[in-house]
Image (cartoon, rainbow, N blue to C red):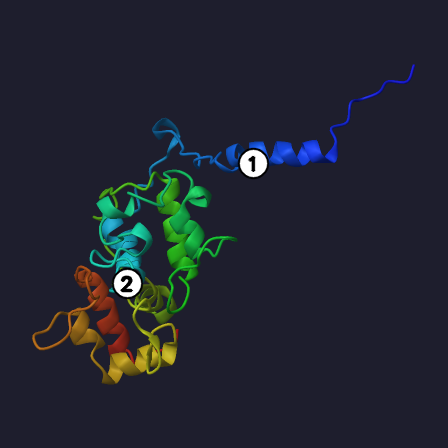
Amino acid sequence: MTRFRKVLPIGGIIAWIAICSPAINSCVHQPFALPDSLIQPDPTICFDRDVLPIFLSNCAMSGCHDASSGENGYVLDSYENIIKKGIVKGNPAGSRIFQSVTHAKGVESMPAVGPGLPDVSINMLRRWIMAGATDSTSGCNVSCDTTNFSYSGAIKPLMETYCIGCHYTSPSNFANYEDVKNAAVTGDIIPDISHDPGYQPMPQNGAKLLDCQITQVKKWVAAGAPNN
């Protein structure tokens, strides 16, 4: 026996779409937030040392996401403001901020000016969100190793975390070894990060670097600022 199915005429389909499409378009699913019971904290992450500087040096600037500008409703100058919008705990892929810095399709890429975030910063943000995006201080007591003052192992990561958000054009492109070397040997990097009187305290808007981090820079410069 041949079975016949009732086929909706084209006009009926168009009418159905016109009636139902508003409801379809209004259906917006919120990103899945991992329950607190399933989040595994990362005791090695210190928010103030590892995460906040990424936002301060790349995002919380005038005309962008500082308190006075608040572009698109985002203020990214403190933990309380950062987690208000665009961060889904336990879900980096569902976090609008993380989508922006990883250039996800359909999302405005950030930072709006300057280079994109380096891999080390993106990986830190991923780890932080996966670990619950907390303001934990559990890892803050872990000091850096002052016996490690190589460019690749110590200096470059410092520049990527604290500096290149502002310093990304020559002659102070701190993503570039030669520019970092010149600024360190003949410029003001050491007195700036040491907050010496008469110099510009750096990182701008952020806390002073740890004494051991400043020591790493000083030792690297004293060794001739090698590209090692």
Q: Which residue is mark 2?
A: 57
Q: Position of residue 65 (x, y in %)?
A: 28, 57
**Residue at the extreme right of the image, as rendered:** 1
User: For the residue marked with disc 1, what is the amino acid?
Assistant: Ser
Sequence-first disc among 1 and 2: 1
SS category of the residue bearing label 2: helix
Above/below status of 144 relative to 126: below
**Looking at the image, residue 149 lies above or below residue 55:** below
Left or right, 22 with respect to 193, comes to right
Closest to the observer, 8 or 139:
8
* Percent x, y of residue 180: 32, 77
Picture residue at 27% right of the left edge, 80% below the top:
183
User: Residue 163 got which mark?
Assistant: none
Q: Residue at x 41, y 47 (%)?
A: 96
Q: From the viewer's perspective, is 97 left or right of 166?
A: right
Give amino acid for label 2.
Ser
Q: Where does residue 138 sit, x and y in percent of width and height?
A: 24, 42
Quadrant position of residue 170: bottom left
The residue furthest top is 1
**Percent position of residue 195, x then y:** 12, 70
26 or 151, which lies in front?
26
* Quadrant placement of the C terminus: bottom left
Q: Which residue is mark 1?
A: 21
43 vs 109: above or below: above
Density class for disc 1 (Cα within 10 Å; few <14, some 14-19, many ≥20) is: few
Residue closest to the eye, 121 or 93: 93
